[in-house]
Amino acid sequence: MIKKSRMIVAGGLAVVVATAGIAVAGTTGADLNDANVVSKVTPSKLSKKKFSRVNVLLGVVNSPDSTGNEDANAAAERIAWSKNIKIDLKKAPRCTAPIANGTPTAQAKAACPPKSFLGGGKATVHAPGPACTPPQADPCKVADPVVSVFNGPGPGQLRLHTFSPALGPASPIVDARIVRANQAERRQGFGQALSVPEAPVTGALKITSFNAKILKSKKVASAKCKPKKFKMKRTVTYFDDSRESVSKTQKCKVKRR
């Protein structure tokens, strides 16, 4: 079993809503969540043979959970992408500065080399409650953290920094790594993956969306239009060791000379 030994995000808020948690018998984390993957490569009109710089948006979406059951939270995440997309972090300097959870975005950027900042996005955090099932989920939204992506601190690593005034010191930093696709993924045409072996623990709260765009201007992401589509596959592991995978494709067009 995956141990729940990591920091609880928004500890104070989790205490407030913890009494809303209800154990659901006979269901798994995968049963309790409606997982989706977010992805987009721009521009989508590209050379068939030559890799060109692109923006790459990656993210996840989860269903708001009216029960507050922790098993519906992700313990680990992995997003794999097809071989016609490449991310090469060696092309950017690394930020090795120590950055604590809860550091405001501006302070985190000031602590890092400017070119180590690769892009950003946003997240959403919900609390459980009777009104927290779609489409009435907004009353239970407790935070909209800003996500910032920094290269480092080590080779092949990404620091996904978040900050929200509502979460304050509990705004987490998510450690991720760009890795080679595993054997099963390579058989399906994937080349690399974003691996998050320890997703933030949220207690009764739930991260219902999390995304970030690696910017074309940072020169670390490239793609070509062969074949004429991009593939993304998200594999999420829950705290009860159940798993589920969801995939998405995006069409691209061949750029003529």
Image: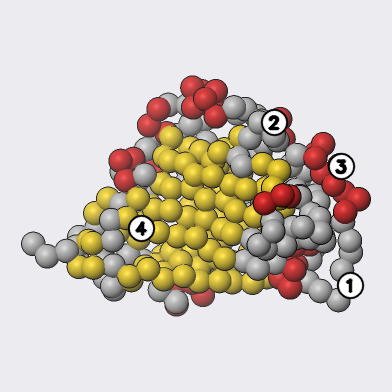
Dot label at residue 158: none
Q: Measure the C-alpha gap from mark 3 to mark 1.
A: 23 Å
Amino acid at the residue labelled 2: Gly
Left-right relation of 164 to 83: right
Whether residue 37 is visible: yes
What colour scheme does the image use? secondary structure
Earlier sequence position, callout 3 versus callout 1 = 3
How many residues crowd mark 3 within 10 Å: few (<14), some (14–19), many (20+)?
few
Which residue does the numbered mark 1 point to in the structure image?
A: 25
Disc tally is: 4
Q: Position of residue 218 (x, y in %)?
A: 34, 40
Q: Which mark is residue 41?
A: 4
Secondary element at tag 4:
strand
The residue carrying mark 2 is 168
Say which label, 1 or 2, has the lower sequence index.
Answer: 1
Quadrant position of the N terminus in the picture: bottom right
Looking at the rendered structure, the kind of residue marked 1 is Ala
Residue name at image x 36 percent, y 58 percent: 41
Sequence-first tag of 3 and 2 = 3
Q: Give, as a three-letter code, the residue at label 4.
A: Val
